[in-house]
Every structure is written in C-alpha cells, then in structure tokens.
Image: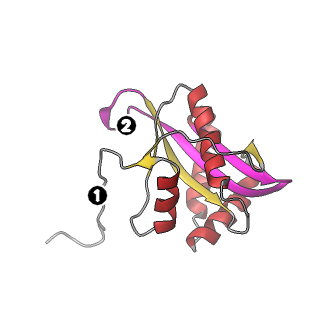
Amino acid sequence: MARKSKSPAENGKITPLGADDLEAVIAIDKTLSGTSRRGFFEKRLAAALDEPGDFIYVGLREGKRLVGFALARLVEGEFGKPGARAMLDAIGVDPNHKSELAGHQLLSAVEEVLRNKGVGELTSQVEWENQNLLTFFASAGFTMAPRIVLTRPTDKPIL
C-alpha cells in the first residue's frame, strides 16, 4: 500500500525511539496482535543500531509513557526500481490511548523525516484479514500498490 500525505492535529509528543523503549513497543504490539514479535523487534533494533541512517523510529508519548510507535526503514532501488523508498514495518497505538489521531500523528512524523531525507514514497504490507489495519491505512490515504506479493508455506514439497 502507498500513502498520500495527511496532517492531523497534534496530540501527545512525538520523540525518537531508543533502545530503552523496546519493551514498551513489544508490549503495545502484543496487545494489538495477540502474539509477541520480540524476535522481529530485537532484530530491527540491532539493524538500526548498525545502520541508524536507514531507519526511522518514532514514538508517541503521554508524559513519559510510550503510547504508540512507528518503525520504517529505507529501501533503495527495491526490485530494480530507481530511487529511495521507505517501508513502514510496524505501527501501533496502545488501545487504552484515547486519541483517534495518534496513528495519523505517528505517520506524519515518519513522513517528515522521510521528506528531510528526500524520500518520496512510503509503503507497507498488511494481511487481508486484518480489517482494523486495512481501515486505518485507508483512512491515512494509503492506496493499493502496483505490485502483488504472493506467499506460500515451504514446509511441504510441491506435488
């Protein structure tokens, strides 16, 4: 999905995420997805520490408490296409946080960093069954990207 820019009213404070935010990010994501993706987030953090210029990690805070996060990474020349793009790897807002604009605020913060880096496109992936995320992406101005990604299990041989 690709996104057109949208600028919501500000709510809370956007700050860069740090390594000390890892547990809060994992907890918010687990609340939303029903499963822990600790390994994914630990690997992303390690990659971001190795190549900090290739990642955008922002958090939304109410006081000192992290209530939302967005993680994106730069993808240059993906699939042989010229130019820099960014992939939104994960976004989440604590369901107890009352603002309906929190997700939009996080996306706007990511886009601001991307504009400063000269990146003109933000994409993401979502499973068709995840109606909440599909609805959010649609409300945020994302549209279907011109490519389709297919997947299949590899644990059984092809007959």
Residue at 73%, 64% in the rendered image? 98
Q: CA distance from mark 2 to mark 1?
A: 16 Å
Mark drawn on residue 2: none
Q: Residue at x 49, y 61 (%)?
A: 135
- Image position of 3 (left or right of 80): right
Seen from this angle, which residue lies furthest right?
63
Note whether residue 80 is visible. Answer: yes
Disc 1, SS: loop
Depicted 74 relative to depicted 66: above or below = above
Residue at far left of view: 159
Name the residue type under label 2: Glu
Q: Residue at x 62, y 33 (%)?
A: 113
Local packing at callout 2 (Cα closer than 10 Å; few below 14, some 14-19, many 20+) is few
Q: Secondary structure at mark 2?
A: helix
Residue 68 position in % (x across, y down): 69, 56
Q: From the image, which quarter does the C terminus lie in?
A: bottom left
Q: Give left or right: position of 101 versus 84.
A: right
**Mark closer to the chain start, 2 or 1:** 2
Give coordinates of residue 103: x percent, y percent. Answer: 62, 53
| The image quarter in which residue 95 lies | bottom right
Please give the residue where the numbered disc 1 appears in the rendered image.
Answer: 150
Q: Is residue 82 above or below residue 100?
A: above
Instruction: Please provide the residue range marked out in magenta.
Output: 55-83
Residue 61 on the magenta segment = yes
| Number of numbered discs on residues | 2
Kindly identify the residue that appears in the image at 59 percent across and 48 percent down: 71
- Find disc 2 in the rendering and name its residue: 78
> Dots 2 and 1: beta carbons under 8 Å?
no
Give the answer, above or below, for where 132 lies relative to 60: below
Amino acid type, residue under disc 1 in the picture: Leu
Location of residue 128 with respect to 123 vertically, above or below: below
